[in-house]
Image (cartoon, rainbow, N blue to C red):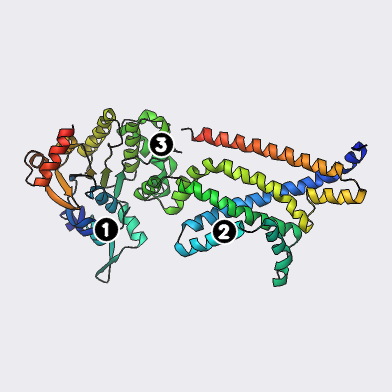
Amino acid sequence: MTETVDRPMVRFEGVTKRYGSLTVLDSLNLDIGRGEKVAIIGPSGSGKTTVLRMLMTLERIDGGVIWVDGEPMTHMQKNGKLVPAEAKHLRRVRSKIGMVFQHFNLFPHMTALGNCIEAPMTVLGLPRREAEERAADLLNLVGLGEKKGHYPAQLSGGQQQRVAIARALAMRPKIMLFDEVTSALDPELCGEVLQVIRKLGSEHDLTMLMVTHQMGFAKEFADRVCFFYQGKICEQGEPRELFTAPKNERTQQFLRAVLEAV
Amino acid sequence: MIWNWEYTIEILPVLARAAIVTIEATFLSFFIALVLGLVLAVLRMSGPIVGWLASAFVELVRSTPLLIQIFFLFFVLPRFGIVLDAFTAGIIALSIHYGCYCSEVYRAGLEAVPRGQWEACTALNVSSWHTFKNIILPQAIPPIVPALGNYLVALFKDTPLLSAIAVLELVQTAKNLGSENFRYTEPMTIVGVAFLVLSLVSAVAIRWLERRLNRRSVR
């Protein structure tokens, strides 16, 4: 197991996703290193959200293998061969991944604290007190220690999204996925969410993968930016490079359009 | 005189006992219907074959009269060696009939819970059972309480059908009293008023429950 250190945290190996006759992702190859922060950008319909959803096992893949932390997730090894994973295997590997959604998907009938202790109690089997301590710490981390008794509807969008981040962290994932986490927020509320993500990036040893439209944030935060176009990675590289001197024509077009809109 | 008070007072205790049978039949049947409805709703949403079978069953029950179902259980099943007493047969028929109607309501409630709730649970690795029990169901139930409550009242008003297999509930008892004494006015009027009062009381109770649930979920 010592050699896993060199292995990427996440590896997409020839991963294909189709909806009917439409190929959303075409034989994707992508490695994400331990602790690496990767931003995925691209026009809508380019398959970028699908990448996260496949990794979170919310979408079944139609071809290829996804590896997580040195072992296949979508498949398992049996007699030296890779066969599609059973539910149990999927659950075990999935426990390394957490996800934050565009529309928060908080549990509306539970308080902020309730949202954060539900999975640790039912999945990890933590006693209530321990789960509550862990949740309270995380709510403090995202700056909502005072709001733990509030229901989602009593919180602003930015606050709800921060609760969602705390909820995902409560399961102690190694990999965090952020799917357009600021897209549903009023512009003035984006900052507080991005601030939390920034803090996670600097204080925690998390591998992060985010789909975003916040080019400024991607540029400043990510170690690497991938530009998706029509189900393929069209161009990738360090943000400074990709944003200032994109080589691909599509990337140039996209960035011009996006930056003009700001 | 059209109304005889002496007779009224004489038959009231008999009708009160019958009212207890009616109320028992109502709540017992409704409780089973609530459970059965949920089971049917879940079956209908799971797997193609099981789902189709459950849907076919629901359609069959909803498309045939309750009275036929009561007769079937009471008069036909004994030919297959299943003998039920009248009360049991009546309860089973009411439960199945209303269970099928309730399953439609549950289904609407369950389908109204956004898919994102399931996805959040997958992302948190919560099992489907816990997801259903702790996350989906608590969100699906409050909005459908009024619809389920309507079925409680409807079921209550259908209990007189049990008189067709001689269950001694309110209407059957009133009928017996009438034919014994050749006076139908008092027993039938009392029974009508009893149904009216009990229906109104349940409607109020349901509205109270609805408000309570809403207050809890006004987050």
Q: Amino acid at mark 3?
A: Leu
Q: Say which of B60 and B22 sits in front.
A: B60
Q: Amino acid at mark 2?
A: Glu
Using the numbered discs, state the Cα–Cα distance from disc 2 to disc 3 in whole angstroms.
43 Å
Residue B2 percent across, percent down from the top left: 90, 38
Q: Dots 2 and 3: beta carbons under 8 Å?
A: no
Residue neighbourhood size for the residue with mark 3, other residues' Cα within 10 Å, grouped as few (<14), some (14–19), many (≥20): many
Q: Secondary structure at mark 2?
A: helix
Are both tags, 2 and 3, on one chain? no
Q: Residue at x 62, y 52 (%)?
A: B98
Residue B59 is marked as 2
Nearest-to-viewer mark from 3 and 1: 1
Nearest-to-viewer mark from 2 and 3: 2
Q: Amino acid at mark 1?
A: Arg
**In the image: residue A14, left or right of residue B204:** left
In which quadrant of the rendered view does residue A200 lie? top left
**In the image: residue A18, left or right of residue A110:** left
**In the image: residue B125, left or right of residue A261:** right
Residue A18 is marked as 1
Location of the N terminus of chain A by quadrant is bottom left
* Chain of the residue under the numbered disc 3 shown in the image: A
Residue A113 is marked as 3
Are both tags, 3 and 1, on one chain? yes
